[in-house]
Image: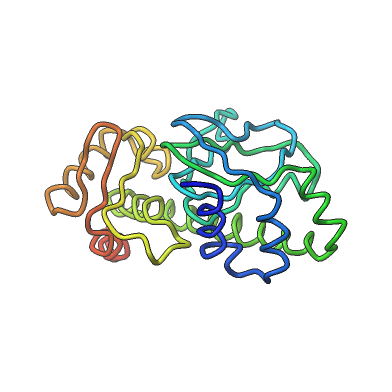
């Protein structure tokens, strides 16, 4: 994918698709396309702001401090989602780390470009604030909602549903491969690796997923989502 194709894709999906043309043009005229290898970080906690990224392909893991400040994976963001805006607004160091969980591409808007757009369009700061609310609040509520499920199997199913399909796209068709380990699924679902293994075997037997080395492919997302939403322990 070249840069022009990436910009056109991100203009149609996610945050920018809901914004006015002036903001779309201001951002997309200043971004550059970057490629990331699996486990390559865009930001580490305590880094300087460094600008924003908009996901074009692949997925980026969100890592947050837990317990003794160990960074653990809690979510994966995909096409059309922009991240890195929190410290851009506050000017403070980062508290969250982001890394590619598979081969991924993203558009980078550096801090100098952010400052330039802010100077030209003061409303841009308000739009970034709305983006922050949209991303962090919405994702946090989903993560909390999943973790509050009493059934471990349903919690694991809900986690797979949340991290598989790009939220911003109605064009992406199944299957959805998720490049994560069973230990990472356990982190996101707050479940032991043994319990994750048993749940995945159950889902695979039903034909909902396919389990391979470090890859879980979701084949029947609706069935998995329906199961996750059912009441019961």
**Percent coordinates x, y for residue 11 in the rendering:** 57, 62
Residue at (14, 53) in percent of width and height? 207
Q: Is residue 26 above or below residue 190?
A: below
The C terminus appears in which quarter of the rendering? Answer: bottom left
Residue at (77, 47) in percent of width and height? 113
The total of numbered circles placed on residues is 0
Left/right of residue 55 with respect to residue 183 in the rendered view? right
Residue at (38, 56) in percent of width and height? 165
Quadrant in the rendering for residue 34: top right
**Percent coordinates x, y for residue 36 in the rendering:** 50, 34
Residue at (73, 63) in percent of width and height? 127
Left/right of residue 205 with respect to residue 7 in the rendered view? left
Q: Is residue 194 above or below residue 159?
A: above
**Percent coordinates x, y for residue 96 in the rendering:** 62, 39
**Percent coordinates x, y for residue 109 in the rendering:** 68, 46
> How has the structure been colored for display?
rainbow
Q: Nearer the viewer, residue 141 or 115?
A: 115
Left/right of residue 89 with respect to residue 84 in the rendered view? right
Q: Residue furthest left?
A: 205
């Amino acid at each position: 994918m070249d840069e022009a194709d990436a910009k056109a894709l991100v203009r149609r999906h996610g945050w920018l698709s809901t914004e006015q043309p002036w903001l779309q043009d201001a951002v997309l005229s200043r971004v550059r396309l970057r490629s990331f290898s699996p486990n390559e970080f865009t930001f580490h906690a305590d880094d300087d702001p460094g600008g924003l990224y908009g996901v074009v392909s692949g997925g980026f893991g969100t890592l947050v401090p837990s317990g003794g400040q160990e960074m653990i994976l809690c979510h994966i963001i995909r096409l059309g989602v922009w991240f890195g805006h929190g410290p851009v607004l506050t000017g403070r160091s980062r508290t969250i780390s982001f890394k590619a969980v598979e081969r991924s591409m993203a558009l980078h808007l550096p801090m100098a470009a952010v400052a330039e757009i802010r100077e030209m369009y003061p409303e841009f700061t308000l739009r970034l604030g709305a983006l922050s609310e949209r991303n962090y609040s919405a994702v946090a509520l989903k993560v909390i909602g999943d973790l509050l499920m009493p059934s471990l199997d349903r919690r694991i199913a809900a986690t797979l549903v949340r991290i598989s399909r790009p939220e911003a796209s109605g064009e992406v068709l199944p299957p959805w491969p998720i490049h994560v380990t069973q230990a990472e699924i356990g982190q996101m679902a707050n479940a032991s690796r043994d319990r994750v293994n048993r749940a995945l075997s159950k889902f695979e037997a039903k034909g909902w997923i396919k389990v391979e080395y470090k890859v879980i492919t979701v084949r029947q997302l609706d069935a998995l989502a329906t199961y996750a939403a059912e009441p019961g322990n």
